[in-house]
Image (cartoon, rainbow, N blue to C red):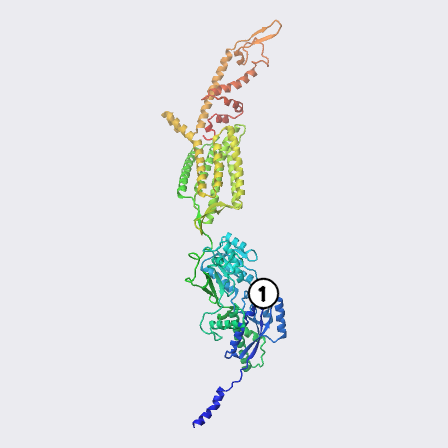
Amino acid sequence: MKMMAVFRLLPVCWLLLGPVPARVLHPLPVLWVLPDRDRLVAPAVRLALQDLRRQPPPLGNYEIKLQLLDSQCDPAESLKALFDALWAGPDYLLLFGGACPSVTPLIARSLPALNLLQVSFSASSNRKWNGNLFSTVPSDRALNQATVKLLQRFRWTRVGVITQEGPRLSEMKKDLNRQLLKADVQVVFWGSLSEDVCSSLRRLKEQDVRIVICQLEEESVSSVFCCAYRLNMLGARYQWLVVDGGTAGWRLEGMDPGCTASRLLPAAGGSIRMQMRALGNTETPGISGQTPQEYQDSYLRQVTQDGSKVSPLHTFAYDAVWVAASALSQVMETVKLREKYGSQRNVSTTGEEVRRTLLEAMKETQFEGVTGPVMFRNGERMTSIELIQLQSSRYVVVGDFNTSTQQLRVLNQLLKFPGPGPARDRTLVFVQRQHVSFLLYSTLSSAAAVTIFITLTVLFLTVLRREHGPGAQDQLLLLVLLLGLLLASSSVLLSGLDEASWSRWTSQLLCSVRLWTGSLGLTGVFSVLFLRSWRLHALCSVRRRPAGCALLLLLLDALLLGSWALVDPLRRDALQLGAQSVSQDEVVQLVSECCSSSNMQLWLAAVCGYKTALLGLGCLVACSVRTLGVFVVAAFSASGLLGSLLTAHNPPVQLCVTGCLVLCCNLFILSWLFGPKLLRRHGSELQQPAAAREDEDEDEDGTRLSRLNRQMKTRTAQLDAEMENISLMLCETCRPAARRRDPGGLRSVTWSHEAQVCPEDRNPEREPLSPDSINSPDHVRRRLSVQLPILHLSYLPGGVSASSSGLFTTMTSCSPETADFLSVHDDDFLFP
């Protein structure tokens, strides 16, 4: 029985343990665009194809047949070879490879027209044109995103960029510029390695750039750090960020004999490199059945056997084979199911519908490769970008950037900087605004308030004692002068106000008000004093309305200031002064705020031009009449303008200089014009008896000039009567002249002194006087017209000075009111 059971099991064992028929592999033609520089990845591709054959179905049912196409890294030759291969056949399902930067973008743009897909292991930059290109290498855009995230992590907003020329790096530079603008990061300087490397770095140093982003190829890193060492751009003040898209570490080999590794390490120490993760760190087997480290060991053994070099892209090429195999096997299985259960038979594997299915399969590809998780989003590989820092000749991974979640992870415990912390992106500038101290402003404002109070008091008294008639013009001029003093004093109060906490519109309005008060105040005061000197100079030969002239000058000033305000209004500008260095990274910047406009110099020249002409004319007129007031106001005005312009950068000093000059000028005018009047009035009140004081109080509305004129008119009438009596008495005492004839018949005449004064001969027997006689009536009247005024003025209080003799002829042509007006004291000439 036992033997029978054994024989019965033999057929089953033969079926289980007997020879198994060979598995039929379905070939999948794929065109491999392989330039000479990428032949180093051939061992990795061969390992992938071998591992693919050992896979169970459905991956194990298909065999990828790679047809080589040498692109020679030439766009024209690549396109020609591609079209020849597509024409000769077979019908390729997709393209593989193409790591040449100058060829890959061109072929990728033509893929939609050729109805093909491409699986590559080279970085792509423009997804708008590369919609049918799927690369296992992260795009340059991901590297730029990691760079921007790192800048935001340490709050660096001011950088400089050094780039290298090349097709891929040019696109990478454009994308970096877009992302920096979006992140509000200021790029101070863009440098290029096509020029002298050291000159570009020198310009970065001159512009105080601390954070430098380098987009370089691996072989150019040493030359950059060599120049950085020569320019002393190293240490805690500088941070270098290198973005090259490679996967290998730096090789700091000085190409210049003066730059050895011992000198390059201090310059590159602390620099951070954005590097694609070339090998996963998981210990779980991936789609190929191997862990990343197991694959690494297999690849190194294969390279050693072949005697070739290690390619930095071998891991990405290995995963690219699995991406193509996974998508193609999925499409083939879909086609088989459609043929088996569908109505169509013998569906072509190169149809348009199959291409769409292959495109969807590529987008949904997701597995664990030797480079980490492999998946695509919008055609871009989602992976991690490593942040590697050079620390004492060692490369340390200090963080990573996940392109899928857009999150940056920094290992602070591993990150080391040459200084106490991250470098600053600029010199720390502390802005110190120069402002007027409270003590200075309170002192000047108190003095200005006292001046305004005195001026208002005088103005109030002047309005109360207003006059009508000839004195109204003089009182109107006095009002203009006092208003000018008020405006000038008010400008001092406005000049010291702090405008830091005010709105922009309020600051501009205050600038205009300050200009108007100062300018109109000066014009009002000086125009009145100028007209006073002009009237003293011209006397009675020129008769005009002085108040109208003063108002005309004020109107001219207002028109000019109004044009300035409308055409080019004043605004508040900040003037940067010298910087004071506090430490190596800290500077105190002094800032002064002032009122300015676009054409400030032109408007100042126009305003100061006509005022200077008016001041000069006033000084000439005042010199001729020897009046002190005009000279003092002109000197104060010129000094105030010069001091304001010279101290415009220092508001406290400007306020102190201009405020003191304006207030001193105002107080001088008040004391010069009204001080003597108060003293004389006070002294006369002490000397007058009580009855006279009562009479003066009753006649309070009259001015001293009117009273003095009335007294002079009365005295003049009395003197005229006395002089007429004296003339009659002299004529009565006249003696007749003795006439003698000499023997020769000539006539000699002897006149007495009385005869010369007497207008006519009282002896009727005498012959009438001839018209040529010295005692003729006409000659006598002429002598009286000269002698009587002299006699009249000799009786005036104080007598007549010799310098007044030249005024007699002029006075004879004046009106009675003008003659009375000129007879008063000089201080009362204008202001009673």
Where residue 676 sits in the image (x, y, percent)? 42, 29
Classify residue 2 by image quadrant: bottom left
Where residue 225 sits in the image (x, y, percent)? 51, 58
Which residue, as the protein is rendered here, is positioned at the far front? 257
Which of these two is toward me, 776 or 348?
348
Q: Which residue is mark 1?
A: 102
Is 477 rendered above or below residue 301? above
Where residue 298 sits in the image (x, y, percent)? 49, 73
Which residue, as the protein is rendered here, is positioned at the far top? 743
Is 573 rendered above or below residue 556? below
- Which kind of residue does numbered mark 1 sit on? Ser
Classify residue 704 by image quadrant: top left
Q: Count numbered badges in the picture.
A: 1
Q: Is residue 593 visible?
A: yes
Which of these two is toward me, 767 or 662?
662
Is 503 rendered above or below residue 748? below
Look at the image and tell me in which quarter the N terminus lies: bottom left
Where residue 344 sits in the image (x, y, percent)? 57, 81
Which of these two is toward me, 64 or 226?
226
Q: Is residue 361 visible?
A: no
Asked which secondary structure carries label 1, the reply is loop
Which residue, as the protein is rendered here, is positioned at the far bottom? 1
Look at the image and tell me in which quarter the C terminus lies: top left
